[in-house]
Structures are given as C-alpha cells and as structure tokens.
Amino acid sequence: MLDCVASGGRRLLPLLALAALVVAIGCGSGGAGETTAGETIPKARFLKKVLAICADANREIERTYGQYSQPPYPGGVKPTEAIMNRVAEEVVIPARAKQVRRMRDLGTPPGEREEVEAILAAIEEGIERGERDRRSLRAAGTDYAFGRALELEIAYGIEECATG
C-alpha cells in the first residue's frame, strides 16, 4: 500500500509543480489593469497614478519634515540648519526613492518612454546629489538637488510632483 502511494505521489509531483506555476503566474503582484516597467499605459491613467504617487511622497515628507520647519518645533526649540539638513536627508531621500520605484512600475504612455525615463533619471540624480551633500536637498536655484527633475516635471505637466 505504501509503495502504491509513493509511486502515485511521484506521478503527481510534476502536475503539482505545474499547478503551482500556473497559480504563481496568475497571482502576480500587479492588480487587474496594472502594468509593469517596459509596458505601456494610457497617458490619462498614467498621469492620475503618478499624481497619486507624488502626493503620497509629498505627504510622507511633510509629515516629518514639516514638524521641524515651523512652530511648534520638536523640543520647543527652532532646529539648526544642520538638523534641518539631516532631517531632509532622512526623509526626502527614501520618499523620493520609493516614488521612483512606484513610478517605474507603472510603465509609460505610448511614445513617451524617453520623457518619463528622463524625469525618473533626474529624480535619481537628485537623490544621489542629496546623498553626497544633504544641504542640496534644501538649497535654492541651481544648487537644489532636484532642480533638473523639477524642470522636467513641470514641462511634462506634473507640476504637483515638482512643487511638493
């Protein structure tokens, strides 16, 4: 009896493996209608999702950074520039990195891959610049880490991402 079960189990093993593969493919991380990097997505849907991603990142940044930027300050004392730069580094860099990952996972509107990739690359450059010099995360003008990304986002029509 035990031999029969064992030999039957060997015959079922390939079928179980195939069934597991089918389930794994059918249960991917993307939901219905989601795209992944390299795929296309209608521009209106892309913009709607990107603006939501940017709003999430901006809220994440404001939730922590905002506590330090205006009264009442943590500890009741206005933070120094060095503290503000450290907080910016600890909050902005991870939020923007997450934003890029989420945006990249969307795919791109047909014919706009280069524009979207340029925006993402500019944000990544801003992250790298901020890692090298945390002061650039709060700087103005050409010293601002995300200055190039800001220009590209405004030109693409996602001002909300650029101004958050």
Image: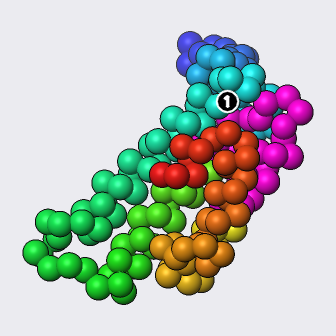
Q: Amino acid at mark 1?
A: Phe
Question: Horizontal and vertical percent for residue 31?
Answer: 59, 22
Question: Horizontal and vertical percent for residue 141?
Answer: 61, 73
- Give left or right: position of 149 versus 162: right
Number of marks in picture: 1
Depth check, front residue: 57 or 146: 146
Which residue lies at the image location 47% right of the left edge and 64% below the top edge? Answer: 92
Picture quadrant of residue 128: bottom right
In this rendering, the answer to whether 142 lies above or below 100 is below
Whether 19 is among the magenta residues is no
Depth check, front residue: 49 or 8: 49
Whether 106 is among the magenta residues is yes
- Give left or right: position of 113 versus 129: right
Q: Is residue 24 visible?
A: no
Picture quadrant of residue 61: bottom left
Picture quadrant of residue 72: bottom left
Determine which residue is flagged by label 1: 46
Depth check, front residue: 42 or 142: 142
Which residue lies at the image location 33% right of the left edge and 64% below the top edge? Answer: 65
* First to last magenta residue range: 101-124
Q: Is residue 136 visible?
A: yes
In this rendering, the answer to whether 12 lies above or below 66 is above
In the displayed orientation, state which residue is furthest to the front.
Answer: 141
Depth check, front residue: 25 or 72: 72
Question: What type of secondary structure mainly makes up the magenta span?
Answer: helix
Which residue lies at the image location 60% right of the left edge and 37% below the top edge? Answer: 50
Q: For the N terminus, which image quadrant?
A: top right
Q: Residues within 10 Å of mark 1 (few under 14, many from 20)?
A: some
For the rendered model, the colour scheme is rainbow
In this rendering, the answer to whether 147 lies above or below 107 is below
